[in-house]
Image: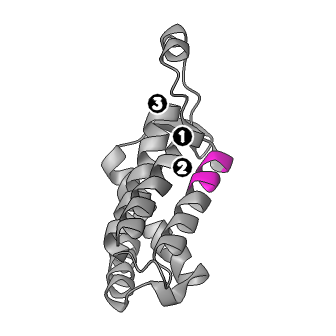
Amino acid sequence: MGFKISTFFAIPLIFLSFLFDTNIKFNSVNANIKYSPANKNDLDLYHGMGVSFLCNATRKGFDLDFPKTLNVASATFASVVSQKHGGKIIERKKEQTIDMKKLQFIASLQLVESALKVCPDNVPEKIETQFKIETERLKKLQGL
């Protein structure tokens, strides 16, 4: 049990350490530098890392709680966009500041969608049902 919990917390920390410069001196020198918004390649990379973490952490042998693991993966995705890119993304060739709660929600839907393709046996039926309900709701909202 101790190994599973320590692994659960270690993986997101390793993920974040690759994405953030923890050198305080470097950060203070570069505090006035404008963040570049996350482009499609950045978002694809963060998404790929998130789905990899989600599938690996919930596979047999680890059996971590899927909803909690999904929350960690989507929160990490939003956190990276916030801290590395100043909460900005390029969408439809325009720079936009995005609400982090909305980004985390969208990231969680996208991560579940990918998990259903990459590691469908790891996704609980309840999560799959919720995903289908939310995507239908979003399609109806977009159709208005």
Figure check: 45 above or below 62: above
Q: Position of residue 12 (x, y in %)?
A: 46, 53
Which of the 4 image quadrants contains residue 58? bottom left
Camera-nearest residue between 139 and 65: 65
Residues shaded magenta = 41-46
Which residue position holds label 2? 15
Which residue position holds label 1? 17
Helix, strand or loop for the magenta stretch, by majority: helix
Residue 91 in sight in this render = yes
Which residue position holds label 3? 86
- Callout 2, which amino acid? Phe
Tell me which residue sits at (63%, 43%) in the image. 39
At numbered mark 2, what does the secondary structure look like: helix, strand or loop?
A: helix
Neighbour tally class for label 1: few under 14, some 14-19, many 20 plus, Cα within 10 Å: few
Camera-nearest residue between 115 and 6: 6
Tell me whether the residue at label 1 lies in contact with that at label 2, contact meaning CB atoms closer than 8 angstroms. yes
Q: Which of pointers 3 and 1 lies earlier in the amino acid sequence?
A: 1
Figure check: 6 above or below 95: below
Q: Nearer the viewer, mark 3 or mark 2?
A: 2
| Disc 3 from disc 1: Cα separation | 17 Å
Tell me which residue sits at (38%, 53%) in the image. 75
Figure check: 82 above or below 137: above
At numbered mark 1, what does the secondary structure look like: helix, strand or loop?
A: helix
Left or right: residue 87 versus residue 126 is right
Tell me which residue sits at (35%, 62%) in the image. 71
- Callout 3, which amino acid? Gly
Q: Position of residue 104 (x, y in %)?
A: 38, 55
At numbered mark 3, what does the secondary structure look like: helix, strand or loop?
A: loop
Residue 144 in sight in this render = no
| Disc 1 from disc 2: Cα separation | 6 Å
Q: Nearer the viewer, mark 3 or mark 1?
A: 1
Inspect the magenta stretch and tell me whether residue 99 lies in it.
Answer: no
